[in-house]
Amino acid sequence: MTVPRPAGRGRMKLAARCRVATEAPSFGMVVFCVILLNAALMGVETYSGLAAEYQRLLRTAEQCCLALFTLEMLLRIGAFADRPKAFFRDPWNLFDLAVVASAFVPFVRENTTLLRLLRLARVLRTARFLPHLRILLIAVGRSLPGTASFLFVGGLVLYVYAMVGWVCFAESDPGHYGSVGRAMLTLFLLTTLDGLTDAVRAGLQISRLSILYYASYALLASFVLVNVLIGVVLNSLDEAREIEDAADRDRKQPGPPPAAGPDADVRDRIATARRALDEIEASLPAQDGRPPRRLEASHSGP
């Protein structure tokens, strides 16, 4: 079994200096302002007149932003010089590295559309500096499994009601219920309750029982299912908040010292057993008026 080699002094000094720089509040504020500047430059480029007049200035500003992003990424990587694997365990570090490094890929740099999309992804990096936005993004990601189940149930309800609508209203209203596809589109638009009044009036001209059809659909699709979706999102938001709080506590608390060898875990267990034996000895009653004898021989371990 190989013993992990501790980081050299040079790497530890480099990591300490880079960590001081990246954890400074001014560093985060500067990077945040550069991200906003990059977003503003992209907005200016959408105006053809300004883009043509200030083409050289805009390109210079974009190169300066890219240089600052690259410097920021190098400092963040340097902060993990003593533990490189920890850098790749953070999803935000991987996202930032992919966004910044993509600007140096030859194929991406030649494709203007793809390059603009990747530049647009830089705006999402503001989540690193805005905790509330970061919590929302985490909540959206954790709500995807529940949202997929919701979409399946919603699609099933929509299909059943579309088939019933096709059977009941296909001949009288072929424009909205002439096929199951049109019926599903009509009902999907009615999910927001927009145009429900007109649909109910048209249905009453066909049959008075149509009020039951539209009322049950509105109750199930617009109230029950939507509230279920809101519940899924709120639950994911609570989980994301707990994850972010735990990450903040881990960042604020200093980590444990590095293990000296592969048997460090065994030594910790021996130390715990020793403390337990000491507590048991202290709780034993005295014999012959003498204090309880401590088992010194048990402490002769490694």
Image: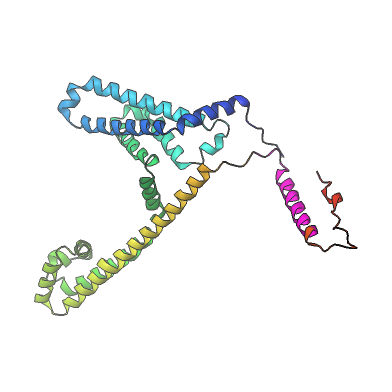
Question: In which quadrant of the rendered view does residue 27 lie?
Answer: top left
Considering depth in this image, is 36 or 62 the residue closer to the camera?
Answer: 36
In the rendered image, residue 222, in percent from the top left (x then y), is placed at 25, 66
Residue in view at x 39 percent, y 49 percent: 135
Magenta highlight on residue 292: no
Magenta residues, start to end: 258-281
In this rendering, position of residue 211 left or right of residue 154: left
Q: Position of residue 126 (x, y in %)?
A: 35, 39
Q: Residue furthest bottom?
A: 208
Horizontally, residue 16 falls left or right of residue 54, namely right
In front: 193, or 110? 193
Q: Residue 55 appears in which quarter of the rendering?
A: top left
Dominant secondary structure of the residues highlighted in magenta in the image: helix
Furthest-left residue in this view? 205
Instruction: Indicate the quadrant containing the N terminus: top left, top right, bottom left or bottom right.
Output: top right
Is residue 280 one of those drawn in magenta?
A: yes
Res 92 → quadrant: top left
Give the percent coordinates (x, y) of residue 33: 32, 32
